[in-house]
Image (cartoon, rainbow, N blue to C red):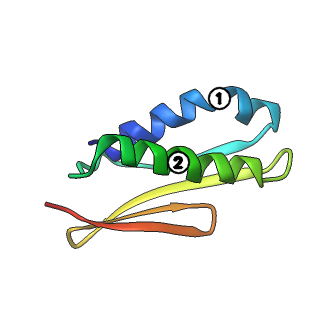
Amino acid sequence: CDLKAEIEKILILMQDFIETKNITIHKNLSPQQLKIDHLLLETLLFNLIGNAIKYNMTDGEIKITVENLFHWHKLMVPQLKLMQLKHF
């Protein structure tokens, strides 16, 4: 699975929710291939990004960052460090 593509897909699905709260999304994403169950990743991202939107203030901001650190991937949304996944 491409982590960047999955994040972009979730953001498109949540566009109405984002616009309703007038939230600005800042992204620092690069393509990252992961060996992970596609449905599991999609559910994880949907919940994480959905909660970031839901619990954010109107006119707020969300920063989404994906980093590759020595064969590990780190995904951060707002102040949350979600996961570190081993790159194969």
User: Which of the image's four quarters has the C terminus?
Assistant: bottom left
- The reply, left or right, for residue 87 in relation to residue 51 is left
- Kindly identify the residue that appears in the image at 37 percent across and 36 percent down: 5
Q: Alpha-carbon neighbours of circle 1 within 10 Å: few (<14), some, or many (≥20)? A: few
Residue 15 in picture, x, y percent from top left: 65, 29
- Kindly identify the residue that appears in the image at 71 percent across and 26 percent down: 16
Q: Which residue in the structure is indicated by mark 1?
A: 15
Residue 72, quarter of picture:
bottom left
- Kindly identify the residue that appears in the image at 26 percent across and 51 percent down: 36
Mark 2 touches mark 1? (CB < 8 Å): no
Which mark identifies residue 54?
Answer: none
Above or below residue 33? Residue 8 is above
Q: Amino acid at mark 1?
A: Gln
- Kindly identify the residue that appears in the image at 80 percent across and 37 percent down: 22
Residue 78, quarter of picture:
bottom right
- The reply, left or right, for residue 61 in relation to residue 76 is right
User: Which of the image's four quarters has the N terminus?
Assistant: top left
Above or below residue 18? Residue 59 is below
**Number of numbered discs overlaid on the protein picture:** 2
Residue 40 in picture, x, y percent from top left: 38, 48
Q: Which residue in the structure is indicated by mark 2?
A: 27
Q: Marks 2 and 1, how far apart in space?
A: 14 Å
- Numbered disc 1: secondary structure: helix
